[in-house]
Image: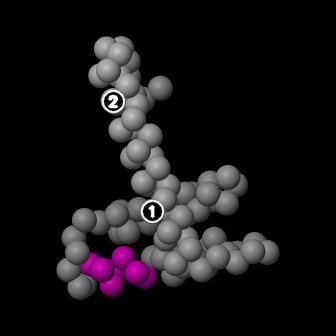
Amino acid sequence: EKEKSDLLDIIFLYRDIIENKVTDGLSNSKKDKPWTTITQKFNTNKTDLRTEKTLRNCWDNIKRNTKKYYATLKREIYKTGIKFSLWL
């Protein structure tokens, strides 16, 4: 959990670039550069070094699991009719 938290803190600084929806060649190359920096920052003062691919997969898994969680929560809200804010 500590590693995921550290990764999220670093990704937060570059999220505008790596989460850009444009997929042309120039934008894709711009998305690759921050991942090199993210990997270097993440591996600073770590004993278990992670590769860029591993960190990207971890980020994708975090996003996927978060989307699943909120989709399930939304289904439960509509199923039970309970009205409350998702921003608890």
Give the image location of residue 75, x and y in percent: 33, 29
Amino acid type for the residue under numbered disc 2: Arg
The residue that disc 1 covers is 60
Predominant SS of the magenta segment: helix
Q: Nearer the viewer, mark 1 or mark 2?
A: 2
- Can residue 37 be spotted in the picture? no
Which quarter of the figure has residue 71?
top left
Residue 20 as seen in the image, left or right of residue 86: left
Amino acid type for the residue under numbered disc 1: Asp
Which residue is pictured at 75% across the width and 74% down the height? 48
Residue 28 as seen in the image, left or right of residue 43: left
- Can residue 16 be spotted in the picture? yes
In this picture, which residue range is highlighted in magenta? 27-33
Packing grade of label 2 (10 A; few <14, some 14-19, many >=20) is few
The residue that disc 2 covers is 75
Residue 71 belongs to magenta span: no
Question: Of residues 12 and 78, which is closer to you in this image?
Answer: 78
